Amino acid sequence: MFPYQQKMAFLKMKLIYTCLLVVGALCLYFSMAPFEEVPFIFKKKHGEFLQLPDIDCRQNPPFLVLLVTSSHKQVAARMAIRKTWGRETMVRGKHVRAFFLLGATASMEEMTAVTQESQQHGDIIQKDFKDVYFNLTLKTMMGMEWVHHFCPQASFVMKTDSDMFVNVHYLTELLLKKNRTTRFFTGYLKLNEFPIRNKLNKWFVSKFEYPWDKYPPFCSGTGYVFSSDVASEVYNVSESVPFIKLEDVFVGLCLAKLKIKPEELHSQRTFFPEGLRFSTCRFRKIVACHFVTPKELLTYWQALEGSREEDCLSV
Ligand SMILES: *[C@@H]1O[C@H](CO)[C@@H](O)[C@H](O)[C@H]1NC(C)=O
Ligand SMILES: *[C@@H]1O[C@H](CO)[C@@H](O)[C@H](O)[C@H]1NC(C)=O
Ligand SMILES: *[C@@H]1O[C@H](CO)[C@@H](O)[C@H](O)[C@H]1NC(C)=O
């Protein structure tokens, strides 16, 4: 070879190596970046609880704690829940309590109203993060943190929403029958879900946010139930799990890391994230139903209280 050609070949190699190096570095950067942002999102930045509920779990350990995600404007929903399935109650000698999970808003009036509501009802858990739909993961993790720090004595926890009907009585019965105490996680199982890559969809998730093709097993965020040890474990592992704004998928990622598999609660279907037509007999044998307005909730409750279980046996 002539020296000139030799020199050109060398330069070409150098160029190729440089390109490879740059591409490699970029790949590394983009695969690491979303994971690095995680840790301080949860704990460090928003350390303090603004509102804590009125309960001493050491003195009076609840059997079941219901954590209900709610926002500032959903006052009617909270009032309806307090009068119905969220009312402090005993089921088969087991203590059940409901609390609402809230973030912060820029409106002084709304913040003051929530503080007053918290003083009046003693059932609000609140931290200083922006209360928007896509901060639901933070809201759920606040609930996990609260159980971990303030109520590990509870036997079970249910995370659910403000537009739900929950049959606390039947849920307690099924949990007692199931007789599981640790590493138990149940709800409406989603075992084969894929990220939605259509930008127009409400649940669109970019490849940047979630690069893999399949979600881990998880339970619909409309209502899932777990033994309280899971809260501590999920809270503990959450910092080392890639952040995703879909809270139920995020909890699924934590469970996968902990090697906890979501399981069925009962041989019959009891969770209805897509909603279900009301009938007293039907609603006696379900755990959770989505798309229930505060008004419907009060009506359903009255109908259930005024009906007798015996009348359903023939159905
Ligand atoms: C979630 O809350 C944090 C802390 O308040 C805020 O910085 C962030 O912008 C919020 N996320 C969204 C999607 O608004
Ligand atoms: C629940 O399980 C424990 C063992 O984990 C067993 O000793 C106990 O008898 C069970 N109770 C019921 C009611 O099945
Ligand atoms: C939290 O995780 C660490 C390791 O990452 C482990 O040593 C510790 O036992 C865990 N704590 C709980 C409460 O699970």
Image: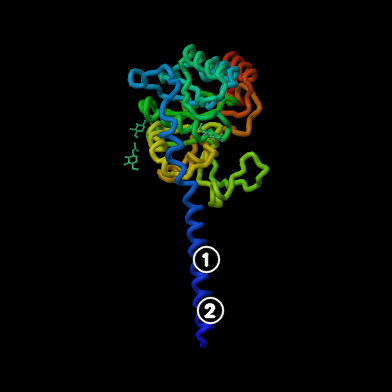
Q: Nearer the viewer, mark 2 or mark 1?
A: 2
**Other residues around mark 2 within 10 Å, as few (<14) / some (14–19) / many (≥20):** few
Spatial separation of the CA atoms under disc 2 and disc 1: 16 Å
Asked if residue 195 shows in the view, the reply is yes
Q: Is residue 202 left or right of residue 13?
A: right
Q: Quadrant of residue 177?
A: top left
Residue drawn at x 65%, y 45% is 199
| In front of the other: 21 or 49 | 21
Residue drawn at x 51%, y 52% is 30
| In front of the other: 270 or 243 | 243
User: Please, is residue 76 above or below residue 218 in the view?
Assistant: above
Q: Position of residue 82 (x, y in %)?
A: 53, 16
**What kind of residue is marked 1?**
Cys
Q: Position of residue 155 (x, y in %)?
A: 39, 28
As drawn, the label of residue 19 is: 1
Asked if residue 308 shows in the view, the reply is no
Q: Which residue is mark 2?
A: 8
